[in-house]
Amino acid sequence: MNTRKTIAVMTGGGDAPGLNAVIRAIVKQGVTQLGWRVIGLEDSFDGLLESPMRFIDFDRDQVRGILTMGGTILGTTNHGDPFTFKTADGKTTDRSGEVMERLKLLGVEGLIAIGGDGSMAICSRLMRDHGLPVVGVPKTIDNDIPGTEITFGFDTAAAFATEAVDRLHATAEAHERVMVLEVMGRHAGHLALASGLGGGADVILIPEIPFRWEPVLGKLMRRRAHKRHFSIVVVAEGASPHGGAILQRINPGGSRSLGGIGEHVADEIARRTGLETRCTVLGHLQRGGTPTPHDRVLASRMGHHAVELVRTGAWGQMVAVRQNRMESVDLAWLLTQTSRQLPLDDDGIATARSIGICFGDETE
Ligand code: F6P
């Protein structure tokens, strides 16, 4: 009989640079140092529910060379909720009991779930309804998970978006255009603020501050009056004009994604000012690529801390960073929270304002 401690690890929701670094840290410490069996569930819970089950029985060779890789070697899905599993005929059925049976069959005594708020909710429900011990590791490029000051993936995405602003500067100046860049971030402006401030944008529009057109257009026209014949506007996908709706796209298959506000802002600027304006939507380019050194380190530290929580039996916790220290928060508490937006008195917003960046709420 296998007496080794056995844990499962899975990645859920949208990918973020650094997922593989977390998996690597968990496997290296768990398997190599502690002698555990670490089973990687493929495509969130989907692989577990197939016959035969799809999973990786990790040995350390399987995590060689993955530190610098984007994506996730385990695969992931946004639709991996076993409580509302989609059947071939488009209906939904509860397969959470099967998940538990199959984990038991594999001898799994607990799960490390690396995911965003959706994955944390699913795993908390598995813990509450079925008694599955869970430790969570937060991931998202949006940096909007409550309880932790930072998530891995954010730094990489922010660096890429900042480089995009840099590149737009050159072409904007050459053509004397207004360049609008739409970045991700869901209902939080962390990515827009970081890339807008880091790249030297003239206007930053974020979900936390509904904007009005007059201050935005006023800023662009003043720049022209001061012989600055180009401008850069960074727009978060969740930003909206005062009293206006948050724009969404309907994907093939019916799911919805935030987006479209960049085009709308560019069209309105062109229509209302006559300035030549173009829009770039960075989209999923922000999620790919090799993690920055910051994210590799953060992800590795989070993986290590998750193992420590398992080792000490601190189930029901999510790894969290506070004042650059690895701590944890209660998963049950997490579920009562909404996404972590920028506070209006954020230092970054104050800094941006102090150097003349417009957020669209200024009184002229
Ligand atoms: O949460 C990460 C994220 O990239 C958001 O910034 C964005 O709104 C969303 O995922 C896009 O999701 P999808 O990959 O399903 O289009």
Image: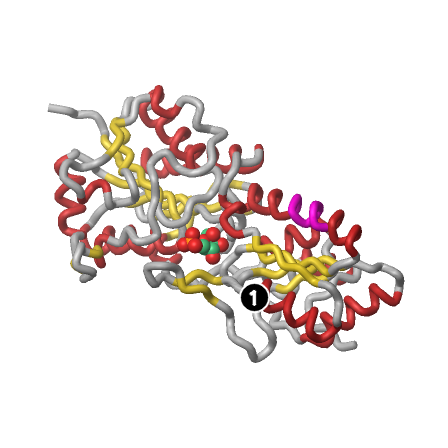
Residue 211 drawn in magenta: no
Closer to us: 307 or 158: 158
Q: Residue furthest left?
A: 1
Q: Residue at x 78, y 60 (%)?
A: 354
Circle count: 1
Q: Residue at x 68, y 56 (%)?
A: 348
Q: Main secondary structure of the magenta part?
A: helix
The N terminus sits in image quarter: top left
| Residue annotated with mark 1 | 261
Left or right: residue 116 versus residue 189 is left
Q: Residue furthest bottom?
A: 243
Instruction: Return the x and y of residue 15 as percentages of the image width and height.
Output: 42, 44
Residue 206 appears in the rendering: yes
Instruction: Return the x and y of residue 359 as percentages of the image width and height.
Output: 69, 66
Q: Residues within 10 Å of mark 1 (few under 14, many from 20)?
A: many
Here the colouring is secondary structure
The C terminus sits in image quarter: bottom right
Left or right: residue 212 versus residue 66 is right
- The amino acid sitting under disc 1 is Ile
Left or right: residue 161 versus residue 272 is left
Note whether 217 is above or below 137 in the view shown. Answer: below
Note whether 342 is above or below 270 in the view shown. Answer: above
Give the extent of the magenta segment: 162-168
Instruction: Return the x and y of residue 149 as percentages of the image width and height.
Output: 53, 50
Instruction: Return the x and y of residue 85 as percentages of the image width and height.
Output: 21, 55
Q: Give the structural element (helix, strand or loop) at label 1.
A: helix
Q: Residue at x 34, y 21 (%)?
A: 60
Q: Residue at x 65, y 47 (%)?
A: 164
Left or right: residue 49 versus residue 213 is left
Q: Quadrant of residue 294?
A: top right
Quick check: which quadrant has ligand 1?
bottom left
